[in-house]
Image: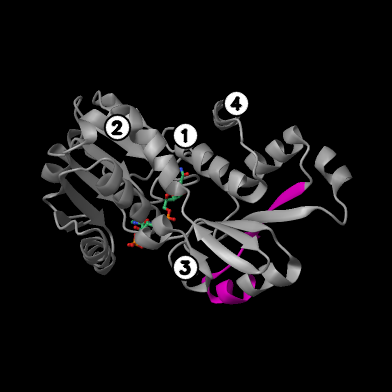
Amino acid sequence: MKILETIDYNTKIVGIIGHPIKHSFSPKMHNFTFQLQGLNYIYLPFDIQTSNLADSLKSIGVLGIRGLNVTIPHKEKIIQYMHHVSEEASTVGAVNTIVNEGNQLFGYNTDINGIIESLNPYKDEVTKSTVTVIGAGGAARGVLYALIRHFKVKKINIINRTEERSEAIKDYFKAKMHFDNIKTFELMAKENLEIYKSSKLIINTTSIGMFPNVDDSPTDLEESFNSSQIVFDLIYNPLKTKFIKLAEKQGATIINGLKMFVVQGAKSFELWTGNSMDIDFMYEELAKSLK
Ligand code: NAP
């Protein structure tokens, strides 16, 4: 492999920390682009358990790592270890990109860029509408921020397995963004069918249905969806989750997580290298390998 031939004393290291990490396509996307652009960088996956998070961040400075992406389940916890946090990441309360500038760790949230790019084609329909967000983790926080600030939605329903977490996120956004039209529901609540039906946009931000658990879905009820809805699943592996397939069968407009994935990655790439990634080219390459 060509990238191995270029590794030397000057090679800059970037990577991703999370757990589990083995299904991430980020190493493929970034290493491919470093090679295309002739940049002396390498992108590595680091499987880090929550108990090792603080120690792993100390090593960034020691090893001279240029930056990291942050994924499940660390996006929220990691914010406390940053020296500087962007305005957006601070409002959201989650960091997915770290840049090391002279041992100072700068935290950003590039998921927001990916969410906005994915939903922008439907902006007119989404603005002032009722939206249901499934999940209350780090990715859900980015989604809520974009829905409130960029799309100016009217009402948000949050459906999540752990009620305390959805209550916490509701209180957080009420305090941070002064948005108080959020209602929370348990994942298996009886009223969820009506909640789904009354939503213009439904977004799955959980990992339910992600490879290898492709037979799982946050809802198994086809009646949850209709042809006037937009249904967005942040998962990109598989490209069509069971959730997306059900929505498509009912005639809904569907969006998978691949555009978001490429856009958030391109923004991280730019923060580390100062270079741009060819988003359309990368989207096509990854779509081919995921099919
Ligand atoms: P996270 O902070 O760990 O949150 C995970 C969320 O999923 C929580 O709401 C959790 O519910 C829920 N969940 C997980 N397993 C579940 C299960 N078996 N049953 C019910 N609920 C379950 O993770 P995250 O960073 O938000 O990421 C969530 C998903 O978004 C992942 O699939 C990730 O790949 C995807 N994502 C995609 C992109 C992209 O670029 N396309 C970017 C970011 C994230 P509890 O609160 O009950 O634990």
Numbered disc 2: secondary structure: helix
The mark closer to the camera, 3 or 1, is 3
The residue identified by callout 1 is 259
Q: Residue 3 at x, y = what percent?
A: 81, 42
Tell me the CA gap for discs 3 and 1: 25 Å
Residue 224 vertical placement versus 227 (above, below): below
First reached walking from the N terminus: tag 2 or tag 1: 2
- Does residue 60 appear in the picture of this structure? yes
The residue identified by callout 4 is 281
- Assess whether residue 242 is covered by the magenta stretch: no
* Amino acid of disc 3: Ile
Q: Is residue 136 left or right of residue 45?
A: left
Residue drawn where x is 28% and y is 47% of the image: 149
Tell me which segment is drawn in magenta.
41-56
First reached walking from the N terminus: tag 4 or tag 2: 2
Q: Residue 189 at x, y = what percent?
A: 16, 55
Q: Is residue 41 left or right of residue 209?
A: right
Numbered disc 4: secondary structure: helix
**Mark 2 near ligand 1 (CB under 8 Å)?**
no
The residue identified by callout 3 is 79
Numbered disc 3: secondary structure: helix
Numbered disc 1: secondary structure: helix
Residue drawn where x is 55% and y is 26% of the image: 280
- Assess whether residue 45 is covered by the magenta stretch: yes
**Mark 3 near ligand 1 (CB under 8 Å)?**
no
- When asked about the image quadrant of residue 9, the answer is bottom right
The residue identified by callout 2 is 246
- Quadrant for the C terminus in the image: top right
